Image (spheres, rainbow, N blue to C red):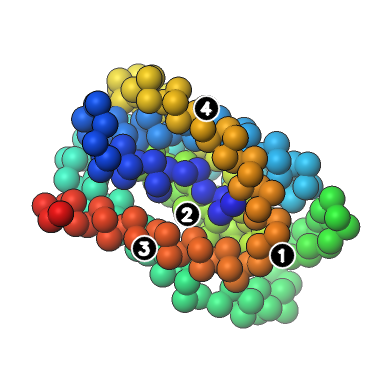
Amino acid sequence: MLGIGGGVFIVPALQLLPLTVEFSPQLAAGTSLTMIVFKAFSSSSGYARQKRIDYKIGLLLATASIPGAFVGAYLTDIIAEELLIFIFALFLLYVASRMIFTSSLGNFKVFTRQRSGWHRRLVDYDGKVFEYFADVRLGLILSFFAGVSAGLLGIGGGSLMVPILHFALCFPLHLAVATSVFIMIFTSISGVTTHLYLGNVHFGYAFLLIVGVIFGAQIGAVVAKRVSSKNLRRIFGVILVLVSLRMILKFLGLP
């Protein structure tokens, strides 16, 4: 529904819930990212039917996010567990604030008036026309760091890629969500490859997560089509605030 990989929920859940396995941040990140590979394929199929994926820009940005995911996954083997938790929480707070308090409409009008960047025009399954201008050079730089966050935190990269596409490249939000999920296919595969090498994947829990997320992703893609952009931003932001606060409490050792 929100164009994110689900890692913002799965990573803290694996660490906070009373499971039969004790998940370190590294193991949670690798297991979550394994699930996200299948989630990305499932969601992308739904958005492809709606014709809301910008394939050209998506593939271009993926060329930058893939090496970033390799780097991020490798960093999990270097950074201390406590610091990973704290980084994750601060990252979520930043993304949440952007989605809740920033006016996307104002940014979109300014960018369209300047008419700078790559002109794009997409028509979805229902005949709705989306027209915008995307600064691909800026997108490539930012996509690399989205890839790093995906590999490092096990989140798929959608938490950063949606704001990047929406605010920096001025994608309409519904297209940003759909294209973010498409890019996530390549980012998550590259990140999980490194995590597999480092032994950061619990296959039992990964399988259970995959079974659930495949069905959930199809429902989310349908719901997103019926929800306004403003409400999507608010839902996204509020959920991320709650998750980030829970992670900060864990970092501080508080219940």
Judging by the rendered image, the residue that carries numbered circle 4 is 211
Q: Earlier in the sequence, mark 3 or mark 2?
A: 2
Provide the residue designation for mark 1.
133
Q: Are marks 3 and 4 in contact (CB under 8 Å)?
A: no
Question: Which mark's residue is nearer the viewer, 3 or 4?
Answer: 4
Residue located 22% across and 57% down the image? 248
Q: Secondary structure at mark 3?
A: helix
Q: Residue at x 17, y 40 (%)?
A: 80
Q: Quadrant of residue 166?
A: bottom right
Q: Nearer the viewer, residue 13 or 54?
A: 13
In the rendered structure, which amino acid carries the disc numbered 2? Leu
* Lower position in the chain sequence, tag 4 or tag 1: 1
| Residue behind mark 3 | 241
Q: Marks 4 and 1, Cα distance to the nearest angstrom?
A: 38 Å
Measure how far apart labels 3 and 1 are at the Cα level. Answer: 30 Å
How many residues crowd mark 2 within 10 Å: few (<14), some (14–19), many (20+)?
A: many
Question: Along the polypeptide, which appears first: circle 3 or circle 4?
Answer: 4
> Tag 4: residue type?
Val
What label does residue 160 carry, if any?
A: 2
Q: Quadrant of residue 239?
A: bottom left
Please report whichever mark, 4 or 2, sits nearer to the chain's N-terminal start: 2
Q: Is residue 148 above or below residue 77?
A: below
Q: Residues within 10 Å of mark 3 (few under 14, many from 20)?
A: many
